Image: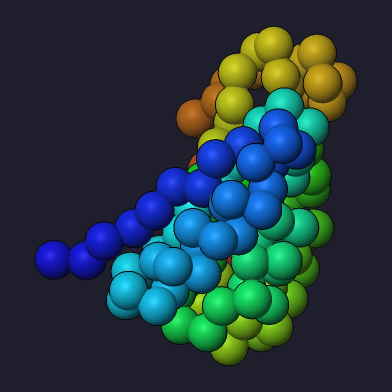
């Protein structure tokens, strides 16, 4: 069995505790620590910070929001994080919901399943080079 840990929301005053939790999970042999995009904090920046302070634990985006960035930008970010962390990055994607998609990012919340399929195709193509 493998264990993972979900880090709390960043920017809510508990950032130091989140880093300490990730470090402890790394020392204890946990498989992955997950960071979410929510309430103004993005996952890639958090995971880069955590990755620089850990050695073995995988770094999971739970999830990077599809309306927030282009598929090509997601692929570049994923490739960079994976390289910088020595192959520890795990990419999680999601469409979020209408409030975030339209309200935060100005992207119409339309055809979420089709949009996800198209997006994943582009990410895979970009990562395959």
Name which residue lies at 64% across and 76% down: 53
Residue 52 shows up from this direction: yes
Task: Give the answer, above or below, for where 95 lies relative to 76.
Answer: above
Farthest bottom residue in view: 86
Residue 90 shows up from this direction: no
Q: Nearer the viewer, residue 110 or 35?
A: 35
Name which residue lies at 59% across and 26% down: 96
Report the colour scheme.
Answer: rainbow
Quadrant placement of the C terminus: bottom right
Name which residue lies at 55% across and 61% down: 20
Q: Quadrant of residue 73?
A: bottom right
Farthest right residue in view: 106
Q: Nearer the viewer, residue 85 or 22?
A: 22
Q: Is residue 129 left or right of residue 35?
A: right
* Image label count: 0
Q: Quadrant of residue 63?
A: top right
Q: Nearer the viewer, residue 121 or 39?
A: 39
Task: Give the answer, above or below, for where 79 lies relative to 122.
Answer: below
Image coordinates of residue 37 in percent, x first then y, are 65, 39
Image coordinates of residue 29 in percent, x first then y, are 32, 76
Quadrant placement of the N terminus: bottom left
Q: Nearer the viewer, residue 96 or 18?
A: 18
Q: Quadrant of residue 85?
A: bottom right
Q: In this view, does 15 lie to the left or right of 26?
A: right
Q: In this view, does 2 lie to the left or right of 36?
A: left
Farthest left residue in view: 1
Name which residue lies at 58% across and 88% down: 86
Image coordinates of residue 4 in percent, x first then y, are 34, 58
């Amino acid at each position: 069995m493998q264990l993972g840990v979900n880090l709390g929301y960043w920017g809510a005053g508990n950032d130091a505790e989140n880093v300490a939790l990730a470090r402890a999970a790394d020392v204890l042999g946990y498989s992955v620590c997950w960071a979410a995009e929510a309430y103004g904090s993005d996952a890639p920046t958090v995971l880069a910070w955590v990755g620089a302070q850990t050695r073995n634990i995988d770094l999971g985006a739970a999830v990077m929001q599809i309306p927030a960035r282009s598929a090509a930008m997601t692929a570049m970010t994923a490739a960079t994080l994976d390289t910088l962390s020595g192959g520890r990055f795990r990419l999680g994607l999601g469409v979020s919901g209408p409030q975030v998609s339209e309200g935060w990012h100005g992207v119409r919340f339309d055809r979420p399943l089709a949009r996800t399929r198209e997006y994943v195709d582009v990410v895979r193509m970009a990562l395959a080079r």
